[in-house]
């Protein structure tokens, strides 16, 4: 079966139809090791250990599909940079940053479950943070409307004082704070990684200037590094009450269910909030084949999410959209899903790549019921959605 179909009449890119991708090779230097999945352990009875899921290969394929896939004419490339330690203090505490600096100096350590700071890791984390800041600054300075920060290690689990879930520094959160400090008044963060964006939520939990929306697997708390549950009633506190919207979705939600969640929950919330900047936090671990999730999105689902978010950017943020890479651990399919999502963001009239492996039969009835119950809950409980 042909995995790639390039239509004969590929639209020629115009300057406004470009995605500016920010990347730095140094991020490949974060070596997370081998073991049983993400444990870093060798039980002694397996001949073949696997690479940690958050390994450089997954991002190498994301890089190469954007360079050599059919979307390549629509991509322009920018080189990322290291963040300064001082820049990290807008989101993270000094004590926490010092803890990571010391861990790096002493040759690294396991910061929390599955999260290994090895030689080269801190350099990569600084590059992920700095590259995302550069991508946001590029938009703020008017050089382009749509930027994609292709980074690792990921960031959305990193809380102000706590690493979690392969994440050390909250790349998207740092970019949001840069935008708020540069004149943006209201920013929405839409997180479709399969895991709850607990770090970003925690960072803005008391703020009514940042609306955090997370669509995720209903995985709950997974230990001391991730005390948040990701349930609908974690709505934010004080001025931030109502400005953290959690959408825990049942396993196997699929393309139709995600489209419904975007249409029924995300679009109306964003329309009421009226942001002047949009940040899309994307993980391809919501795909049907990811070793770290069970949500069953295919390329078409990612394409549709890309289209919807592009529509919101056109309507609200003067077409300005920062996309930040998070998880996504199937080494080939993650790259295909990224390609499809960016096709959607570009609003292309037809797919540039066909799906090489999607075959999942969908049953969206249960997901639809769950989404409708979340909608009723939000309409009862969230002041800005109620119109209060
Ligand atoms: Zn994830």
Image (cartoon, helix red, strand yellow):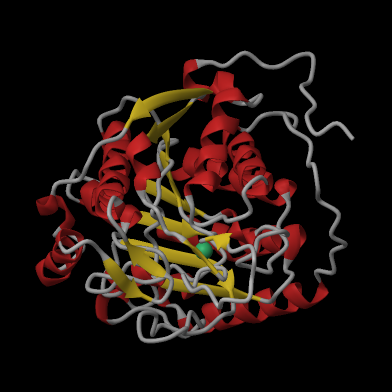
Q: Is residue 207 above or below residue 322?
A: below
The percent coordinates of residue 292 (x first, y second) are 60, 67
The answer to whether residue 259 shows anywhere in this view is yes
Quadrant containing the C terminus in the rendered view:
bottom left
The percent coordinates of residue 200 (x first, y second) are 35, 65
Q: Is residue 345 above or below residue 359?
A: above
Relative to residue 98, is residue 8 drawn left or right? Answer: right
**Residue 118 sits in quarter:** bottom left
Name which residue lies at 58% across and 37% down: 342
The answer to whether residue 387 shows anywhere in this view is no
Which residue occupies the foreground of this view, 84 or 370?
A: 84
The percent coordinates of residue 97 (x first, y second) are 16, 64
Q: Is residue 121 above or below residue 205?
A: above
Relative to residue 3, is residue 306 drawn left or right? Answer: left
Q: Is residue 120 above or below residue 247?
A: above
Name which residue lies at 11% across and 71% down: 95
How many numbered circles are shown? 0
Relative to residue 102, is residue 284 drawn left or right? Answer: right
Name which residue lies at 70% across and 51% down: 301
**Residue 206 sits in quarter:** bottom left
The percent coordinates of residue 175 (x first, y second) are 28, 49
Quadrant containing the N terminus in the rendered view:
top right
């Amino acid at each position: 079966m042909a995995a790639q179909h390039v239509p004969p009449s590929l639209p020629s890119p115009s300057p406004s139809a470009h995605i500016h991708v920010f990347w730095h090779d140094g991020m490949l230097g974060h070596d997370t090791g081998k073991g049983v999945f993400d444990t870093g352990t060798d039980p002694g009875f397996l001949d073949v250990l696997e690479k940690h899921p958050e390994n450089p290969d997954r991002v190498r394929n994301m890089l190469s599909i954007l360079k050599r896939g059919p979307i390549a004419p629509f991509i322009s490339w920018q080189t990322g940079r290291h963040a300064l330690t001082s820049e990290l203090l807008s989101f993270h505490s000094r004590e926490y940053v010092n803890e990571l600096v010391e861990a790096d100096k002493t040759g690294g350590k396991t910061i929390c479950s599955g999260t290994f700071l090895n030689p080269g890791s801190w350099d990569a984390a600084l590059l992920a943070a700095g590259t995302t800041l550069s991508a946001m600054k590029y938009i703020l300075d008017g050089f382009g409307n749509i930027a994609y920060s292709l980074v690792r290690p990921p960031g959305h689990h990193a809380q102000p004082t706590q690493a979690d879930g392969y994440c050390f520094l909250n790349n998207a959160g740092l970019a949001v704070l840069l935008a708020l400090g540069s004149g943006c008044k209201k920013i929405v963060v839409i997180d479709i990684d399969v895991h709850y964006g607990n770090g970003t939520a925690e960072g803005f939990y008391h703020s009514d200037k940042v609306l955090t929306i997370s669509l995720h697997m209903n995985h709950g708390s997974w230990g001391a590094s991730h005390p948040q549950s990701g349930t609908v009633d974690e709505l934010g506190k004080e001025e931030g009450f109502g400005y953290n919207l959690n959408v825990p979705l049942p396993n196997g939600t699929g393309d139709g269910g995600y489209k419904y969640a975007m249409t029924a929950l995300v679009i109306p919330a964003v329309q009421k909030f009226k942001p002047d900047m949009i940040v899309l936090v994307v993980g391809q671990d919501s795909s049907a084949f990811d070793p770290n999730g069970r949500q069953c999105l295919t390329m078409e689902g990612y394409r549709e999410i890309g289209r919807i978010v592009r529509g919101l950017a056109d309507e609200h943020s003067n077409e300005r959209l920062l996309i930040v890479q998070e998880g996504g651990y199937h080494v080939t399919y993650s790259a295909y899903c990224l390609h499809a999502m960016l096709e959607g963001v570009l609003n292309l009239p037809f797919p540039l790549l066909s799906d090489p492996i999607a075959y999942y039969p969908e049953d969206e009835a249960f997901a639809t019921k769950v989404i409708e119950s979340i909608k009723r809950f939000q309409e009862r409980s969230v002041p800005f959605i109620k119109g209060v």
